[in-house]
Amino acid sequence: MQTNPKIEKKRSDEKLLVSEMIDLYCRKQHGSKKGQLCPECRQLHDYALARIDHCPFMETKTFCSACKVHCYKPEMREKIRAVMRWAGPRMLPVHPILSIRHVVVTIRSKREAKQEK
């Protein structure tokens, strides 16, 4: 099966962003060391990466939060929301490029969603 390099780059970028946010959250909320996750955060991390790997909408979607179809189990969705809510505002000093790119893509997707209505 041949893959589109653009889609794979997008998938890779999303995985990196999610991984960094979970890592930051776990370090600050659970006291884990950089690069090491507690069992609960490891489970969430592995689940999120698996969801990203199997996302059929990767070509057209921006981020999971902007997707019309939510493929996370309700419990995991609440956990990832908590991580994103906490880590999102704290990502700028840690990963400025990732943070700015995420904000730009989010704003763009919200504009496009408004135009579709």
Image: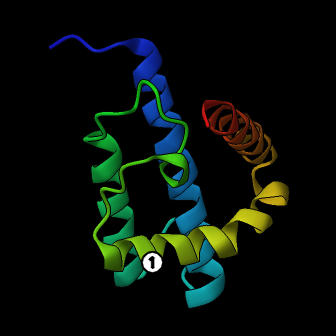
Most distant residue in the left direction: 1
Q: Residue furthest bottom?
A: 30
Under circle 1, the secondary element is: helix
The residue where tag 1 is placed is 79
As drawn, is 50 to the left or to the right of 18? left
Q: Quadrant of the N terminus?
A: top left
Identify which amino acid the numbered label 1 is placed on: Lys
Q: Is residue 1 above or below residue 101?
A: above
Check disc 1: other Cα within 10 Å, few if <14, some if 14-19, many if 20+: some
Whole-percent x, y for residue 89 in the image? 78, 66
Q: Which residue occupies 78% across, 67% down?
A: 90
Quadrant position of the C terminus in the picture: top right
x, y percent for residue 5: 41, 13
Left or right, 57 with respect to 90, comes to: left
Quadrant in the picture for residue 39: bottom left
Q: Which residue is nearer to you in this view: 52 or 91?
A: 52
Q: Position of residue 111 (x, y in %)?
A: 73, 36
Q: Nearer the viewer, residue 46 or 67?
A: 67
Report the number of discs.
Answer: 1
37 left or right of 42? right
Looking at the image, which residue is at 35% across and 45% down? 52
Above or below 84: residue 61:
above
Residue 33 can be seen in this image:
no
